Image (cartoon, rainbow, N blue to C red):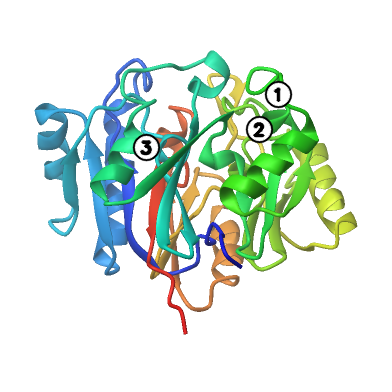
Amino acid sequence: MSMIMPPEWAPQDWIWIGFPHLDEEWPGWLEPAQEQMADFASAVAESGQEVRLLVRDEANAARARQLVSEKVTLEQRVYGDVWLRDTGPLVVHEEQGRTARRFGFNGWGGKYLMPGDMEIGAELARDAGLTIETAAMILEGGAVDGDGTGLVATTEQCLLNPNRNPQMSRAEIEAELAARLGFTRVLWLGEGLVNDHTDGHVDNLARFVAPNRLVVPEATGKDDPNAAIYADAAARAVAAGVEVVRIPSPGRIERDGRVEPASYVNFAITSHLVVVPTFGSPHDAEGVAAIAALFPDRDCIGLPGDAVLAGGGGFHCASQQMPAPRHTS
């Protein structure tokens, strides 16, 4: 295959992670969110992988340095949101080596536009020595999840949302995914999780863990707010010929009476470690164990992610990996 976006379980050179810094994004939760993100960065660094933790300014750097392992590298950058899965570079393998893709970014449908977020992806790619190809189509990295064979999962709620690319048809979006990222087959899922700020990013709903093998949560408890959404996603995947593995959901997680889009599926796959967010749910241990069983070649840990979620995302959302060069025979 001449061009492909490697799956997350492919070898990685390093991982970028964003460090929280905005009080208004984490009202009452900023310090615990910083602590949880620091624990995530430290765990990956201690596992033997390079971690580049982005910090906003000197004060942010000083706070981060108090919290993280000495193995974590700090990089001072201008960014607003920490969700580098969406604003960071998407790296593909081509015949000439690794190149970066930068799509249009409009603050998740015009909801959250902050200084630096439109530029950070190109800046990281450029400083990594990558050639950058830009595209006009609005696309966040968390909206797509590929299996390394050309198959990609996404949701209609996000990619067909009129607040992203109203001028583009489904067929035109599929063509752009093929031309820019090497995705030749699209698995269209329906809605994302209830109250997901991203309009239904797939990385909070369903993730590939191997070629043609997709993890989808299963409702736990009669009050699980996403029961019908999970069932629909699983049914669509099975109908498309994709192997589906079901894992427990955290169940109903609320904050101040509002349902939170909590998901174990927002795990981050790194070179030696899989990190799963936990939420103080009675299903946390079961959820982490189910994901660990899918990655026998890596360690798997659960880390508290409830404070990070207060800002609208999880560990996967806040990170973006740099794939290692493709070896050719």
Residue in the picture at 37% in, 66% down: 324
Q: Which amino acid type corresponds to the residue marked 1 in the rendered image?
A: Asn
- Closer to the N terminus: mark 1 or mark 3? 3
Closer to the camera, 135 or 228?
Answer: 135
Which disc is residue 161 wearing? 1
Q: Residue 200, labelled with which disc? A: 2
- x and y percent of residue 99 in the render? 41, 53
Instruction: Answer whether residue 76 is visible to the viewer in this image.
Output: yes
Q: Are marks 2 and 3 in contact (CB under 8 Å)?
A: no
Task: Look at the image and tell me in which quarter the N terminus lies.
Answer: bottom right
Residue at which label 3 appears:
121
Q: Residues within 10 Å of mark 1 (few under 14, many from 20)?
A: some
The kind of secondary structure element at disc 2 is loop
Q: Position of residue 276 (x, y in %)?
A: 48, 54
Badge 3: few (under 14), some or many (20 or more) residues near its Cα, within 10 Å?
A: many
Q: Is residue 252 left or right of residue 233?
A: left
Residue at the location (27% across, 52% down)? 129
